Image (cartoon, coloured by chain):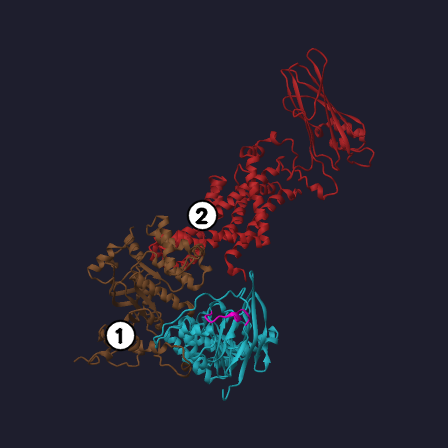
Amino acid sequence: MKGILSSLRQLRQYPTAVIGMIIIGLLLVVSIITPIIMPYSEAIRLWRGGELVWRYYPRNAAPAWQNWFTSTDLAASVIIDSSKGDIEPTFEQISADTREGFYSYEFDFPYDTFPPEVILFAAAKYASKQPFVELTWITPDGREIRAGEFSATANTSVRFDQDTRLQRRLERETGIKGITVIEGLFDDPSKEGIQVLQGTYRLDATALLFEPESTLDMTFVSYGKVHGLAGTDHQRRDLTVALLWGTPIAMAFGLLAAVFTTVTTMSIAAFGVWTGGWVDGTIQRITEVNAIIPLLPILIMVGTLYSRSIWLMLGLVIVLSIFGLQIKNYRAIFLQVKESPYIDAARAYGAGSNRIIFRYLIPRVLPLIIPAIVILVPGFVFLEASLAVLGLGDPVLPTWGKLINDANTQGALFNGYYYWILLPSALLMIAGLAFAMVGFALDRIFNPRLREV
Amino acid sequence: MEQKNELVLKVRNLRLYFNTRGGPVQAVDGVDFDLRKNEATVIIGESGCGKSSLAKAILRLLPRNAGIYDGEIWLHDQNIMTLDKEAYRKEIRWKRISMVPQAAMNALNPVMKIGDQVAEPAMIHMNMNNEEATKAAVRMLEHVGVPIDFLHRYSFELSGGMRQRSALAMALVTLPDVVILDEPTSALDVLTQASIMNLMKRMKHELETAFILITHDIATSSELADNVAVMYAGQVVEVGDARRFFTQPLHPYSHALMASVPRLREVVEPEFISGQPPSLLNPPTGCRFKDRCPKRFDKCDEEPPTILYDVDRKVKCWLYV
Amino acid sequence: MSNNNGEINETSQVNGRPLLEIKDLHVWYELKRFGFGHAGYVRAVDGVNFSLEHGEAIACVGESGCGKSSLMKTILGLNVPTKGDVIFDDTSLSTTKGNELRQYRSKIGYVQQDPFGALPPFMNIETILEEPLKINGVSDKAERASRIRKILEEVKLTPVEEVLPKYPHMLSGGQQQRVVIARAMIMEPKLLVADEPVSMLDASVRVEILRILRKLQESHNLAVLYITHDLSTVRYFSEFIFVMYAGEIVEFARMEDLLDDPKHPYTNALLEASSDPNADNALVQREIPKGEPPSLVKPPTGCRFHPRCPAFMEGICDVKEPPNFEVSPRHLVACWLYDENKGHAV
């Protein structure tokens, strides 16, 4: 074992391996931290919770860092939530029962593009009389635009862009036919055509609450075209969640599958070689039969007909790989090792079969196994992703492969949502590359014959 | 002595170092020896003394980590160290200096018939066509005692002795000036070994060839040797006439080596050399044998010169100054 | 699994039987055609008899393929006798199985030819030497340590502390071979089987290894079976020699008798072919029997050496298998030359 550790230390001499180790290290750190800061249930809520969880996120927004690379600044989201204390409404008692509340949503808008949507969410509590709200839009250049009124229910969302009266009013004010509400609200009248006026906007909401017990919280959202580290998908879900949670899943799937298949395959090969005779023959025949059973169709079949749970898939992959063709390779090596004089010596001083297999045969091939495991990992990571891409991903868990699948069904590339495909694919590739770089370096260290070639 | 054979090969101050992570390994460090026509020079040395590297250095079969490689190798009147790689490959290797590599009997190509394999060097290096080359191969195989009907067999169908003979035929088919034999008999049985030795004794006289025999086996080396060079830790410590070497070795190492050989026909208690040869990575200054030498004295901390002893013996030891 | 010293040793000497008895031993390997059909036998060992007393050394000389390795592996309990028996220390190999067989094996020390191959490269010296002790039930760590120290001192691998943590590749060939010897001796066997223990070592260390073996033999009253193809080392080692050819023993004698007065033509040829360092060697062509050792699947009828024998007598050697003739006390030769009537029935 000391020998193996000292060999691992040699990894430092291979720059590619160092880079690979750093990447693997980061991926592992992410894999460990993610479940801590975002426990499984939280992740599921964020990914599966429904409209209410992610309604403040923009739809199909690009990652925020895209602005670093483009000259036009895409709008970011502005969320001002009175229930969170972002603003403090002021109240005035106008009669015994009725209060008037002033909600002033002020925000900077330094961007070059119009927000795709502007929505005011209202949540009112009342017994029988709905609170009534009047909205005024105040542009940076001081124009005041009446932006409609509504009666708030427990769950009202005022979509400015769907207010046809407002749209007509804005058409009149700007003199531009067919201008949308949002364009009208953010337009710079001093400039030709439709252009964004940058500056500080304000939405004033005056609410009348007709009951003493009545309350009203309102959240103003000017949706951005960019969001977070990874953007959002067609359902407004933050892709970061899936990318983060995809990491531990990919790592776990890849590592577990690689370790289990390698260890079991090797043990079976060692046992077969040592026992010989019909046992070896049977193992050989099973391997050969197994080799012509295609893995993917079976997984698809089980996924379609039975369950798509990732752990079932993992188990199935391992079970089907145990008698993989790797057995043949290991067998060839073991047949050689079996003839080593030191094995004869061990038999001569009375070592039994189990001891010979586990103390003498297997340690001899460990140097081959360690790089093999590392090199196998990406294959299984990709397999898991491929299953997800084929629509056989775990129904609950967000994974990298599922993102690609979603992106694919939503025509992400056709619509220009490159990040939706790029980010999970890049993670897959980087993970694969990192394991490959470390694996190949390990191969060189443990199999010195490769070094000079 | 009286009538000397023509000098074929003269090696002077040959060095071959290998670069390793630990630093340069001085595998061949300033080696001198001569080789005459129809004679054999035996390079005797123990494992790790650099004798196989010497063979590689002469044939310029350098591994990738070869570092310093210099000195002179005079083949007749030509210093072949000055040839460039391509010229060396075309004019010297196998055509004029060939080799029977270590464990040659296991180095034959298993998917090529013996006849074709022996003809191959003739075709490549002598520009012979298939027919001529096959003829040459048949001639040489007959010469080394491989029955003609083995021509169409594969190496695994042959016994060790026959394979070794075939490898020898491969080295001889181009009628080179020098053949290097690297441990030609070490993996063979006693009887086969003796008959291969018989064969090589005959070849030495019958062909216009000189042999360099590289071996660790002193008893076998005496079967073929006209000259003996003893290598220790990358250097030749003694070189000279075989007859006198076997009766009276000069260098303390040669002495100890001779004394370590168990005798079959005499009852002499053999002795061993205690200690181990120095690492070629950082060989000690002065005489490299000094730590194991029974005759060590203060001078030995300085590099010993090569002393001419008698007419044609040289020894690298302060005892003979 | 208890250890096997003391009492058993005495009892076996009391009843006067030799330590090792090989009785009409045959080791045949079945040749299969296409993996199942029978295609004959390789008669690697074909009727071998000899015995070995406590503390005695015997050398087995022969070329590759003469059956000496099969004989050795059978004695070690690694092969199964096809016919005949090996009786070691009152245990008959042919009836021993399972755990008892493993115990049988652990009572014989085994020194191999290639010291590097004989040591697992992934274990350090301490682990290597501990293995036989652990396997054979020496569970006390302190006892193991003291036995390892003792045996390493005996094979002169000192200082012990420096050697123990090393891995085989860090040692020289001679040191590796001493580890192999130490491992073979650590169970304090009564018999040591040494398979060409010095043939892969440099000349300068061979003698040292042979001396260590001889010293162990004397101090432990150890019986040694020394297997070699090299006659020159035999003189310094054994009391008896037997020469094997094509699965059979062709000559058996005391060491001096065999080396100084060989009888069998094959023994003669072996001696003729082995040289001492001597410049005169270069001047002579040696007499070597033509041809090569026969196939062990279909060995020649009569004497197996007859196709190559310079003293071949037609009608006798190729017809009748020669019995052992005792040319002098304890000097047996299987050759018709030593029959009074030269093989012709009276």
Task: Name the tint of chain A in the rendering.
Answer: red
As shown in the figure, which amino acid type bears the numbered disc 1? Answer: Thr
Q: Quadrant of residue B274?
A: bottom left
x, y (%) of residue C327? 22, 76
Q: Quadrant of residue A338?
A: bottom left
Q: Are marks 1 and 2 on the same chain?
A: no
Color of chain B here? cyan
Pointer 2: what residue? A320
A296 relative to B188, above or below = above
Residue A404: percent from left, percent from top: 59, 43
> In the rendered structure, which segment of residues is drawn in magenta?
B293-303
Q: Secondary structure at mark 1?
A: loop
> In which quadrant of the rendered image does the C terminus of chain C lie?
bottom left
- Circles 1 and 2: CB atoms closer than 8 Å: no
Please determine whether, in this image, residue A78 is positioned above or below residue B4. above
> Mark 1 against mark 2, which lies toward the viewer?
1
Near-viewer residue (A352 or A109): A352
User: Majority secondary structure of the magenta segment?
Assistant: loop
In the rendered image, is residue B317 in sight? no
Chain of the residue where label 1 is placed in the rendered structure: C
Q: Check the residue under mark 2 and report the chain it is in.
A: A
